[in-house]
Image (cartoon, rainbow, N blue to C red):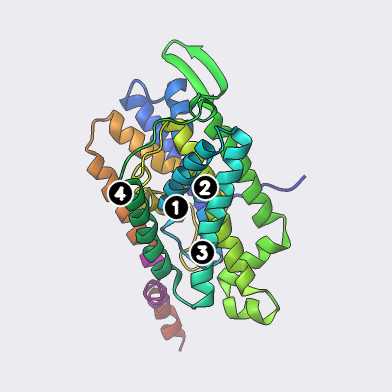
Amino acid sequence: MPKLRIGSTERWLILVILAMVVGLGFTTTTFLTLSNIFDLLNTSAVNIIFGVGLLVVLIAGGIDISFTVAASVVQYLTALTVAQLGGGDWALGFALAAVFGLMLGCLNAFLIYQFRIVSIVVTIATYNLFFGGLMFFSGGVSIYDLPDWWTTRVVVFGTDMASGRAELTLPVLVMVVCVVATWLLLRRTTTGRQLYAMGDNPEGARRVGISIGAMHYLAFGWLGLMAGIAGLMQAHYAQEVVPNALYGRELDVLAAVVLGGARLGGGRGTILGVILGIILVAITQNGLNLLGISPYAFKMIVGAIILVAITLSSEGAGRLIGSWRTPAARRIA
């Protein structure tokens, strides 16, 4: 049986989450109810699917901010295609969402690798390309006439409590499958180790024979695949396709993933860290709502997390930390 290894970042996150749970449990009457906890899982499932996809890109040394609008495009394309095909079913829906998402992710990989452009520049461009194209061709009109199989709530587990009915729905089950698949990719395959190697030292990875181009297509294609599935689940949860429903969520997911220990720069990050980071952000948002605090406070926290993560990932931070350690060396000299 493999040994469960929990890093220092994950341990700190667990302690912070426990402290917040205890604090919110004492200060609110609804936070520790089973229905609220299940709602947190249901609403966090889509972000966790996004998060494990984004983790693969970050480990490979890239960054992508276009995945949420790509998911919106996939929602529209899937809805229009199943309408043309007469309705379809869940198998067709997952297949279409996966293919459309994979194609959009591979488009990012093609532009980044073939033209040697920095990934954040490419994904800023495709972010606007995807969203602008979606709004132009859809006219900003939502789609409410979805097939019954897509909009009917699928309850995986449900129970009646004094505080109300608590249910775990299909997005949670799909999230578990996506998490396990990504964990197997990263931890149980040679390809996963090659992704870590490329993110940590691209030139070294190239010299030992790792195909850098294939790694780009794999990383961004995997994120596109996860984004497509997450978009399908978001439309199932909301029971409609809204062109701007996921607009702006990419920063929340990015903040949660870097909070979970993924390094902006590549080579480091864990599935457990992503899950804990997203749960921590979800609890923060839920707690602020229950306490009646302005939602702008949540945006401020997300911005601060990204700023701190980028600062700690920079060379300047490394030099600053190094300078704190030099006095002892100077005394020895």
Label 3 or label 2, whichever comes before in sequence order = 3
At 39% from the left and 31% from the top, the residue drawn is 144
Q: Are marks 2 and 1 in contact (CB under 8 Å)?
A: yes
Disc number for residue 70 = 1
Between 128 and 188, the residue placed more toward the observer is 128
Number of other residues with Cα within 10 Å of mark 4, as a class: few under 14, some 14 to 19, many 20 or more: some
Label 4 belongs to which residue? 301
Label 3 belongs to which residue? 107
The answer to whether residue 169 shows anywhere in this view is yes
Q: Nearer the viewer, mark 3 or mark 4?
A: 3
Q: Position of residue 171 (x, y in %)?
A: 53, 34
Q: Are marks 1 and 3 in contact (CB under 8 Å)?
A: no
The stretch in magenta equals 310-323
Above or below residue 235? Residue 167 is above
Task: Determine whether, in the image, residue 313 is placed left or right of residue 183.
Answer: left
Label 2 belongs to which residue? 228
Q: Nearer the viewer, mark 2 or mark 4?
A: 2
How far apart are the alpha carbons under marks 4 and 1? 25 Å
